[in-house]
Amino acid sequence: MNTLPNLILLIAIIIGATLFALALIRSRHTVHNAANTGTHMQITRFAEEAVALRNLLMMQGTADNQVLIADGETRPIGIMPDTVDADNLTDEPKAIELLGIAGRTLPMVGAEALDVDVDVYSIGTAGKVGALPEVDGTYYKVGRTVTACGGDGYIVEVAHHAPVAVVVSGS
C-alpha cells in the first residue's frame, strides 16, 4: 500500500494550490491599486498668492496643482486650513479640505455676522462665506452654519456640501 507517498503528494498539492491562490490574490490587489487613483477628503496644492488667514475658501488655480483664494464668482473646491507667505508660494504644497467630501464640519471665515442654521455662500473676493447677497450674480452655496459667526473675519463652523450655483437676478 502506497498511502504515505499518496499523503505526501496530497499535502504538496494543497500547499501548491494555497501558494498559487495567495499569489493570484496579491496580483489582483496590485493591479487594483495601480489602476485606482483613490478617494481623498483632502488634496494638496500650491497657493498662487499669499493666504493671510486660515480656513479661507479656495478655487482652482491657473495650473492643475495650484489654488487661488475663492472670488465668489467661481466654484470653490475647499478650504485651506493654513496660511502661506508671499515669499513661500513654491516651498511646499498645502492641504485643501474638499467641500462635500471632508468627513466632518469645516471651519470657514465669515464675511459678516451669521446666525446658527443659516445657508452660507462663497461671497466677495476674499474667500469668506456669508448670507446670499441681494446683488445680481451667481453665488455658490457651500453649506449651513452649525455655529454663529460674530462678524467679518470670525470663524464659523459649517456643515458643508458640494458647491451649488445659485443665481440672483432682478434686484
Image (spheres, grey):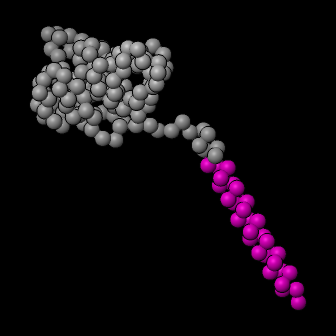
Residue furthest bottom as drawn = 1
Which secondary structure class fits the magenta region best? helix
Q: Residue at x 45, y 25 (%)?
A: 93
**Which quarter of the image is occupied by the N terminus?**
bottom right
Q: Nearer the viewer, residue 99 or 112?
A: 112
Q: Is residue 86 left or right of residue 112?
A: right
- For the view shown, which residue lies furthest in the right direction? 1
Question: Which quadrant holds residue 122?
Answer: top left
Q: Is residue 72 visible?
A: no
Query: Whole-percent x and y of residue 85?
Result: 36, 18
State whether residue 27 is above or below residue 12: above
Give the quarter of the figure containing the C terminus.
Answer: top left
* Residue 2 included in the magenta stretch of the image: yes
Q: Nearer the viewer, residue 42 or 48?
A: 48
Q: Please state the horizontal and vertical placement of residue 126, each as a whole percent of the image.
A: 26, 16
- Of residues 132 and 52, which is closer to you in this image? 52
Q: Give the image quarter of residue 89.
A: top left
Q: Residue at x 18, y 37 (%)?
A: 146
Query: Residue, x 36% and y 21% (percent of image)?
Result: 84
Is 16 on the left-hand or right-hand side of 55?
right
Q: Is residue 4 above or below residue 68?
A: below
Residue 150 appears in the figure: yes
The answer to if 26 sits in the magenta stretch is yes
> Looking at the image, is 27 positioned above or below residue 67?
below
Residue 69 position in % (x across, y down): 33, 17
Query: What residue do we see at 24% from left, 21% from top?
Result: 128
Q: Position of residue 137 (x, y in %)?
A: 24, 12
Q: Which residues are magenta?
A: 1-29
